[in-house]
Image: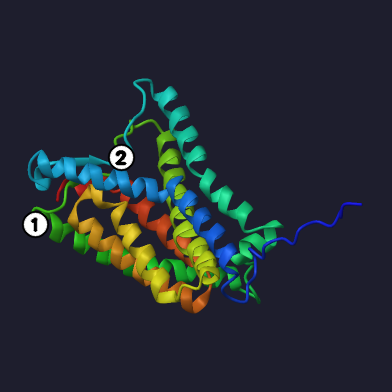
């Protein structure tokens, strides 16, 4: 009589460290697929955009629009922008699913466990505000230097029309970037990297390089700035294990940039 016993499942959620060779091979494929569906794909096309820009003249004479309109009709554009934002968050839902079973356990593995102790959430927010001020000042300096040296394109943070609802679209876009980049580039890669046997330094450097590459369409300045930001965020996460402050800081950085179009236009 044939056995009805189920084959042993691979320990893809072992939190003690590196998993078996076979499990690491599967996780490696998983990481590749997740990145191809999200920021790895963005990095490839961003580099290609930079190459095209360099062949078309100096970067200083070119303008990059971060939130470009998708339709002539303001209403249709708002609907499309919202749909694009929601669909672009699918990789975030995917990694949360992969980090399961159970939402609470998945979020904990990705650095989003519920804050412990009284005032834990407030500490995350305050930490995010501090990071925002630190990274924000550095980002402005790197952008201004890149513009002065002619190695950074002029950024137009928003090409959307002036209808009131587009303020909400820009805020949603900032939230989208904060969730997508920090959950995948930090929370997910640290979690799976630990199971692959990668050290924190390997994950930090690899994640930071990828972060710089998918901003390369903006020029050399943003590459350097995002590389530094990735290293700082990675070091902080490796010491605290808390992802929420990084998300808060990232959302504030992008929201400030998106609503500061007039300032960027003067550089």
Which class describes the residues within 10 Å of circle 2: few (<14), some (14-19), or many (20+)?
A: many
Residue extending furthest top? 73
Measuring from the top left, give residue 48's x and y in whole percent: 24, 43
Residue 52 occupies quadrant: top left
Q: Secondary structure at mark 2?
A: loop
Q: Nearer the viewer, residue 61 or 253?
A: 61
- Is residue 61 found left or right of 209 in the rendered image? left
Residue 70 occupies quadrant: top left
Rendered residue at 48%/57% (across/down) = 184
- Is residue 152 found left or right of 217 in the rendered image? left
Q: Secondary structure at mark 1?
A: helix
In primary-sequence order, the first of circles 1 and 2 is 1
Which class describes the residues within 10 Å of circle 1: few (<14), some (14-19), or many (20+)?
A: few
Rendered residue at 24%/58% (across/down) = 223
Task: Find residue 78 and name its label.
Answer: none
- Vertical placement of 73 versus 251: above or below? above
Q: How much space separates mark 1 and mark 2, taking CA atoms?
A: 22 Å
- Vertical placement of 125 versus 162: above or below? below
Q: Is residue 95 visible?
A: yes
Residue extending furthest bottom? 239
Rendered residue at 47%/61% (across/down) = 248
Measuring from the top left, give residue 166's x and y in whole percent: 41, 35
Q: Which residue is mark 2?
A: 158
Q: Which residue is mark 1?
A: 148
Measuring from the top left, give residue 185's x and y in whole percent: 44, 60
- Vertical placement of 249 versus 260: above or below? below
Residue extending furthest right? 1
Measuring from the top left, give residue 47's x and y in whole percent: 25, 48
Q: Nearer the viewer, residue 103 or 81?
A: 103
């Amino acid at each position: 009589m044939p056995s009805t016993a189920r084959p042993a499942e691979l320990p893809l959620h072992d939190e003690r460290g590196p998993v078996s060779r076979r499990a690491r091979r599967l996780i490696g494929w998983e990481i590749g697929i997740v990145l191809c569906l999200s920021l790895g794909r963005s990095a490839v096309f961003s580099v290609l955009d930079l190459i095209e820009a360099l062949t078309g003249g100096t970067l200083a004479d070119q303008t990059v629009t971060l939130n470009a309109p998708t339709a002539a009709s303001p209403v249709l554009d708002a609907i499309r922008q919202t749909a694009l934002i929601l669909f672009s968050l699918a990789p975030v839902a995917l990694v949360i699913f992969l980090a399961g079973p159970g939402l609470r356990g998945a979020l904990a593995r990705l650095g989003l466990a519920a804050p412990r102790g009284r005032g834990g959430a407030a500490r995350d927010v305050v930490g995010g505000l501090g990071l925002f001020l630190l990274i924000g000042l550095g980002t402005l300096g790197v952008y201004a230097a890149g513009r002065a040296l002619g190695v950074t394109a002029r950024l137009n943070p928003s090409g959307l029309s002036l209808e009131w609802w587009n303020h909400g679209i820009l805020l949603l876009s900032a939230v989208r970037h904060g969730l997508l980049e920090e959950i995948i580039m930090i929370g997910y890669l640290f979690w799976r990297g630990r199971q692959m046997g990668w050290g924190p330094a390997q994950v930090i450097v690899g994640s930071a390089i990828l972060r710089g590459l998918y901003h390369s369409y903006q020029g050399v300045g943003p590459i350097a700035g995002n590389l530094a930001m990735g290293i700082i965020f990675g070091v902080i996460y490796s010491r605290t294990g808390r992802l929420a402050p990084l998300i808060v800081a990232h959302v504030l950085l992008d929201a400030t940039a998106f609503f500061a179009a007039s300032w960027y236009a003067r550089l």
